[in-house]
Image: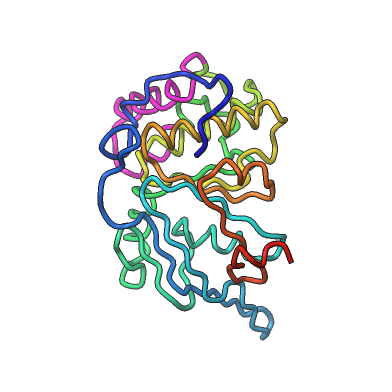
Amino acid sequence: MAQPTTAQPGGDAESLRVGGGPGRPEPGPPVVEALGVSKVYRLDGVEVRALDGVELVVARGDSVAIMGPSGSGKSTLLGLLGGLDRPTGGTLRFDGRDVTGLSEDELAAVRNRVVGFVFQNFQLLARTPAVANVGLPLVYRGLGRGERRRRAVDALQSVGLAHRLQHRPSQLSGGEQQRVAIARALVTEPAMLLADEPTGNLDSRSGEEVLNLLGRLHDERGVAVVVVTHDPGVAARLGRRVTLRDGRMVPERELTR
């Protein structure tokens, strides 16, 4: 991502770094490969082709914006890239592993290890303090309470919220809630952050802070960042852009038609 131009939340990034150092992700297979994937739904006997032959490879340390109008297939592709769904056709691989041969439990384990999710509406537990919200994904890894808290505190420190550990979502601003959500996505040390309209519910200043934070995490740790967005300004902050229309990838030369 482009280098941030304004001040960003501070913190110790070392404990959550992905890869072999700043800007040097570990070598290996791509984080996710969607090769000729399609997704077909059947609704009341009618076949709906939500994705048709989509090709997208997200390498380690990549930064990608996914754009397209409503109904273009962005949400369906997001579900595939996040391991929340399986394609009807084509090949989908995470860290070199084809999802075809994975059980639901195995796919969930891969998802928990590889992908960190950031949602537009934050998806925080309303009555739970920030530190417990952030530590929640670690419950599924079987970590003890003390280790979960230590990692959650480190993650919150890395997004500049070490002073908000015990604050509930209602006690935080929208920008702070999104930074808690980013810390929760980071706490499992994923290879990829998958963000769905991460600035959609924020004012311009908070949105800029969140984009700066995502840029810093990408640049310093080599974590891949994939952002689904309607905003061309947000897309311009990432290394490359892919556009969907009617479930298909649109070549760049067709974008101006």
Q: Is residue 123 left or right of residue 26?
A: right
Residue at 61%, 61% (x, y): give it: 243
Q: Is residue 66 left or right of residue 46?
A: left
Looking at the picture, how far across and down is residue 41, in whole percent? 60, 76
Q: Is residue 120 left or right of residue 140?
A: right
Check the image and report above or below for 27 versus 164: below
* Image coords of residue 6 (percent x, y): 58, 22
Q: Which residue is pictured at 59% across the width and 67% down the height?
A: 251
- Foreground of the two, 13 or 142: 13
Residue that appears at 38% across and 45% down = 61
Give residue 116's quadrant in the image.
top left
The type of colouring in the image is: rainbow
Based on the displayed image, in which of its 4 quarters is residue 40 positioned? Answer: bottom right
Q: Residue furthest top?
A: 163
Please report the bounds of the magenta region as a residue range.
134-163
In the image, 110 versus 147, the foreground residue is 110
* Quadrant of the snapshot with the C terminus: bottom right
